Image (spheres, rainbow, N blue to C red):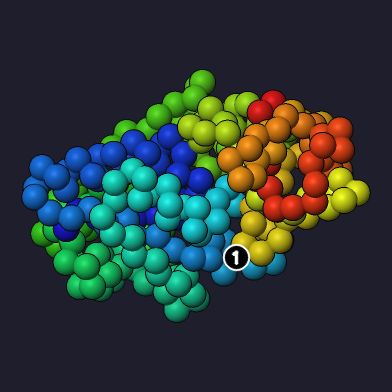
Amino acid sequence: MVVATGFFDGVHLGHRRVIDRLVSAAGERGTESCVITFWPHPRKILKAGDSQGLGLLSTLDEKCSYLRELGVDRIEIIPFTEAFSRMTTAQYLEQIVIGRLGGTALVLGYDNRMGCDSSGADEVARVAESLGVEVIRETAIFGGDLAISSTRIREALLLGDVTSAGKMLGRRYRIDGRLEEDGRFIVSGSQAEKLIPGSGEYSVIVSAGGKDSEAECIVGRDEDMRIDCGDSLPPADYSVTFVK
């Protein structure tokens, strides 16, 4: 089995390069591809007091859906707990990658970090190879002068630059929720964990039942959202896709 491991929030273009390499490497070796990911976000456990404003780019279900669309054979979701966070790089590779999954090869992105020792990609590669695991390295994708990352996408969204965020994601950013009669857009359930773009006015596409409608979305400073579609949409559940 060929394995890639990480949080993969948003499954953006940088992640896709790693996943494409994972799937192709598994095919070349005649084995399965597997992504190991975690839930909740590590920062919610390791920095609980500092995670209040952490908005995600995808829910767990969305992340898994994106990974499957890219051809991943197996997705292993590991609960991220304090006990799990204390595993070293070697323990993680021995117990999870090799012991639980029978991994024989590991695809590493440029910024892969692993274990309580916070090993970077070079150190992870050294430890993996010492355990008999083949290491496949993948380079970064750059947007401008900086590598594409989930952090950069979050920063763009918070600045209201949904166009740049969409380019780095490889798709327009979307949030699902319920449109109320007064125009309020209520985000709840797992969608409530997603990041709401910074305050401002946005052109959006509101979708439901295969029908798309152009509209304006106003995000307030307290992250409340209102949809202006000329009273043409009835109260219901919709997806809101940010265009610009």
Please name the amino acid that badge 1 sits on.
Answer: Lys
Which quadrant of the figure has residue 215? top right
Residue in the foreground of this view, choosing between 19 and 218: 218
Where does the N terminus fall, quadrant-wise? bottom left
Q: Residue furthest bottom?
A: 83
Say what secondary structure mark 1 lies in: helix
Instruction: Report whether 180 appears left or right of 129.
Output: right
Q: Residue at x 43, y 52 (%)?
A: 65
Can residue 224 be seen?
Answer: no
Instruction: Report whether 101 appears left or right of 37.
Output: left
Residue 46 image offset from top left, x and y in percent:
56, 67
Instruction: Report whether 169 appears left or right of 235.
Output: left
Q: Residues within 10 Å of mark 1 (few under 14, many from 20)?
A: some
Residue in the foreground of this view, choosing between 44 and 3: 3
Number of marks in the rendered image? 1
Residue in the foreground of this view, choosing between 236 and 21: 236
Residue 117 image offset from top left, x and y in percent:
39, 62
Residue 87 image offset from top left, x and y in percent:
37, 72
146 in relation to 71, above or below: above
81 in relation to 145, above or below: below
Can residue 95 be seen?
Answer: yes
Residue 63 image offset from top left, x and y in percent:
46, 52
Q: Residue furthest top?
A: 144
Q: Residue at x 53, y 43 (%)?
A: 150
User: Which residue, given by chain and number where applicable, does mark 1 sit on?
Assistant: 44
Instruction: Report whether 185 appears left or right of 150.
Output: right
Q: Residue at x 40, y 69 (%)?
A: 78
Where does the C terminus fall, quadrant-wise? top right
158 in relation to 95, above or below: above
Which quadrant of the figure has residue 128? bottom left
